[in-house]
Image (cartoon, rainbow, N blue to C red):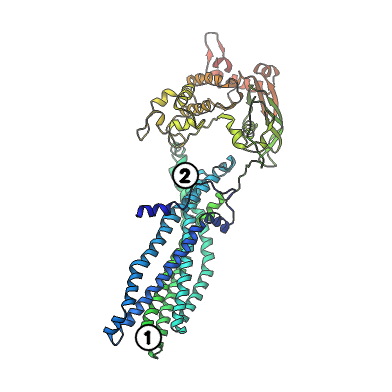
């Protein structure tokens, strides 16, 4: 029976359903309502259940008063005979009605709202954040963003549920108590009315201050998480430079700051709780004094006095519970406010209203008077005019900061151009959906990170519907099959089912690179971008992979970036960038003959460490980088 009952309540919130459109609002109350309104029926039911709980709690002192009145009757046998209906009603209330009310309240709170709302908030926060632009993640710590997404779900639920229950309970119980005491004698209700007035004054004074201090404490706690994650993520650097004590100092500062912030917050909480204790004591003393005064004057029955004191005591108990809840509520509100800094942010890159999927038939790419600046004082690209023919393989060359990666990022629509436009097969990328653009482009980057999942899942990321045979074929083409077959992870999973660790930490750089290449092989997109795609490979593996990449390039439009000129010298055309402008374009031979930027870069590499690694001792001369690769 209970299992069926649990399932009914647990199914009330569809936590992972499609979220409502738009970013969560940046205003605090609107942010709360954005999520609560999706479970508003449950919150209304919770108001009803809390109302019933508060009313049932006021009935208990009334029953005590009735029993005391029964026990003080002069004709006890007659009083007991006449009291059977009342006693049966008491039994029905205590053994049936009140337990049912408490069960309904618990099912709503613990089985419907608490797990459902927490999961809903986390899911929708993740859904929104994962669709943020790439620069959004560059501007913050991944650990801090993840922490905010996770903690906001729990904090919003705790503060919303506790706030509704605490405020609603104390209001309902207090008003019911005032009515019951007032019906007995209006003077008995005066201490409770005065107590409420003092309680409101305390709340108006302390609550805003606790809210502000909670936000400060939460901000510092987030910094602790960010610094700890930063240290752990870069643990190899910490070990290589023997700097654990520096990391201690780095983290100690924010832990001390958090202790100070928490100390200021807890001082205020202690003051609030102590003053509330004093107010509660005054309520009990005043209620007892008024009751004794009225009883002495024969204006109050013992039964009513026996009801009044438990009612007053229950108010003080509820107020203590509420005060403790208030401290937790505002700590959680601070967590929510801090989380909103990452979550309640509109997407920086959005598709236009009538955006259409990009359709590629040929693979021609045109950059027309393209300019871009991260800010007005730092132009990165200036009036780029470039056409890449269908199936053409070009190399982007230039010193660090010349604009090569920025040009690729604009093609991928990680940023929007400041002016000008990019067209693929005549379609303006600014008018195409971002996902459709990236689905048509395969990219292998220099800094390859893998998902903390199985080898199969990582390779299949390029084509989710791929069969296992296709995954294996992609691994073979990327020269990755042999080492994958020999893998065994820390849980005993082997081969393609072995997990790679966070960011692929269990694999070498070359192994990660080959899996990344296998992923792109499987994707088989019509446009291919290679950003130092073989930089992490040894010479033997690089030669093998380059042969596979040459096959992968067939029929595709290719853009390759490499600082090692020998890697891209064979491409159809080389584009030289300098200070955000195209300064040279042509084949390897043509650019050498031109004697400009490319020639200088080539001569520098030919006369540097690359040339020195392969002397042709038999002929007594030094090989060029191009000759070394061939």
- Give residue 108's quadrant in the image: bottom left
Quarter of the picture containing the C terminus is: top right
- Badge 2 element: helix
Residue closer to the observer: 66 or 396? 66
Count of all numbered marks drawn on residues in the image: 2
Residue 295 picture location, percent across and down: 38, 88
Dot 1 or dot 2, earlier in sequence: 2
Q: Which residue is located at x 56 percent, y 59 percent?
A: 29
Q: Which residue is located at x 28 percent, y 87 percent?
A: 75
Mark 1 crowdedness (10 Å alpha carbons): few <14, some 14-19, many ≥20: some
Pick out the residue farthest to the top.
619
Residue closer to the observer: 153 or 532? 153
Above or below residue 51? Residue 124 is: above
Mark 2 crowdedness (10 Å alpha carbons): few <14, some 14-19, many ≥20: some
Q: Which mark is residue 218?
A: none
Q: Which residue has dot 1 on it?
A: 301
Residue 103 shows in this picture: yes
Residue 4 picture location, percent across and down: 37, 52
Residue 379 shows in this picture: no
Q: Is residue 289 left or right of residue 144?
A: left
- Badge 1 element: loop
Q: Is residue 134 left or right of residue 143?
A: right
Between the C-alphas of marks 1 and 2, the distance is 67 Å
User: Viewer-nearest of labels 1 and 2?
Assistant: 1
Above or below residue 405? Residue 105 is: below
Residue 358 picture location, percent across and down: 63, 32
Residue 365 picture location, percent across and down: 67, 27
- Give residue 87's quadrant in the image: bottom left
Quarter of the picture containing the N terminus is: bottom left
Contact between labelled residues 2 and 1, with CB atoms less than 8 Å apart: no
Q: Which residue has dot 2 on it?
A: 229
């Amino acid at each position: 029976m209970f299992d069926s009952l649990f399932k009914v309540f647990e199914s009330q919130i569809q936590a992972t359903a499609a979220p409502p459109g738009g970013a969560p609002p940046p205003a605090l109350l609107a942010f709360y309502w954005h999520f609560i309104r999706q479970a508003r029926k449950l919150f209304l039911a919770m108001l009803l259940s809390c109302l019933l709980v508060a009313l049932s709690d006021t009935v208990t002192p009334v029953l005590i008063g009735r029993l005391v009145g029964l026990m003080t009757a002069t004709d006890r046998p007659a009083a007991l005979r006449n009291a059977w209906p009342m006693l049966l009603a008491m039994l029905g209330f205590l053994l049936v009605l009140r337990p049912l009310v408490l069960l309904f309240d618990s099912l709503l709170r613990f089985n419907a709202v608490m797990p459902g709302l927490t999961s809903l908030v986390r899911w929708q926060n993740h859904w929104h954040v994962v669709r943020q632009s790439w620069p959004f993640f560059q501007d913050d710590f991944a650990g801090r963003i993840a922490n905010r997404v996770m903690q906001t779900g729990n904090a919003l639920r705790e503060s919303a549920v506790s706030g509704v229950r605490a405020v609603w309970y104390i209001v309902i119980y207090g008003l019911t108590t005032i009515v019951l005491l007032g019906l007995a004698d209006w003077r008995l209700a005066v201490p409770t009315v005065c107590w409420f007035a003092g309680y409101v004054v305390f709340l108006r004074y302390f609550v805003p201050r606790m809210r502000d201090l909670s936000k400060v404490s939460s901000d510092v706690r987030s910094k602790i998480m960010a610094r700890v994650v930063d240290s752990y993520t870069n643990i190899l650097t910490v070990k290589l430079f023997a700097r654990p004590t520096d990391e201690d100092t780095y983290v100690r500062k924010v832990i001390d700051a958090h202790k100070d912030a928490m100390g200021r917050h807890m001082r205020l909480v202690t003051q609030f709780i102590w003053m509330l204790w004093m107010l509660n004591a005054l309520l009990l003393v005043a209620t007892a004094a008024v009751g004794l005064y009225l009883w002495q004057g024969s204006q109050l029955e013992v039964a009513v006095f026996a009801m009044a004191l438990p009612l007053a005591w229950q108010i003080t108990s509820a107020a203590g519970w509420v005060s403790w809840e208030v401290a937790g509520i505002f700590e959680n509100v601070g967590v929510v406010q801090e989380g909103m800094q990452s979550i309640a942010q509109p997407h920086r890159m959005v598709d236009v209203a009538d955006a259409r999927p990009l359709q590629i038939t040929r693979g021609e790419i045109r950059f027309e008077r393209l300019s871009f600046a991260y800010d007005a004082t730092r132009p990165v690209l200036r009036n780029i005019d470039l056409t890449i023919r269908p199936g053409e393989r070009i190399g982007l060359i230039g010193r660090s900061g010349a604009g090569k990666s920025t040009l690729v990022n604009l093609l991928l629509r990680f940023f929007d151009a400041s002016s000008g436009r990019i067209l693929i097969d005549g379609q303006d990328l600014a008018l195409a959906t971002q996902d459709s653009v990236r689905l048509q482009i395969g990219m292998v980057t220099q800094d390859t990170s893998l998902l903390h999942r199985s080898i199969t899942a990582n390779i299949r990321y390029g084509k989710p519907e791929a069969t296992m045979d296709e995954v294996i074929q992609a691994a073979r083409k990327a020269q990755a099959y042999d080492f994958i077959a020999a893998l065994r992870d820390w849980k005993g999973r082997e081969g393609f089912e072995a997990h790679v660790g966070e960011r692929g930490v269990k694999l070498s750089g070359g192994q990660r690179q080959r899996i990344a290449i296998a992923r792109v092989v499987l994707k088989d997109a019509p446009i291919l971008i290679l950003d130092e795609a073989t930089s992490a490979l040894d010479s033997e593996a690089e030669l093998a992979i380059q042969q596979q990449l040459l096959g992968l390039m067939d029929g595709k439009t290719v853009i390759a970036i490499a600082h090692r000129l020998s890697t891209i010298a064979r491409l159809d055309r080389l584009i030289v960038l300098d200070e955000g402008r195209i300064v040279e374009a042509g084949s390897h031979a043509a650019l050498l003959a031109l004697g400009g930027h490319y020639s200088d870069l080539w001569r520098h590499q030919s006369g540097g460490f690359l040339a020195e690694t392969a002397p042709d001792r038999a002929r007594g001369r030094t090989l060029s980088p191009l000759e070394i690769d061939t």
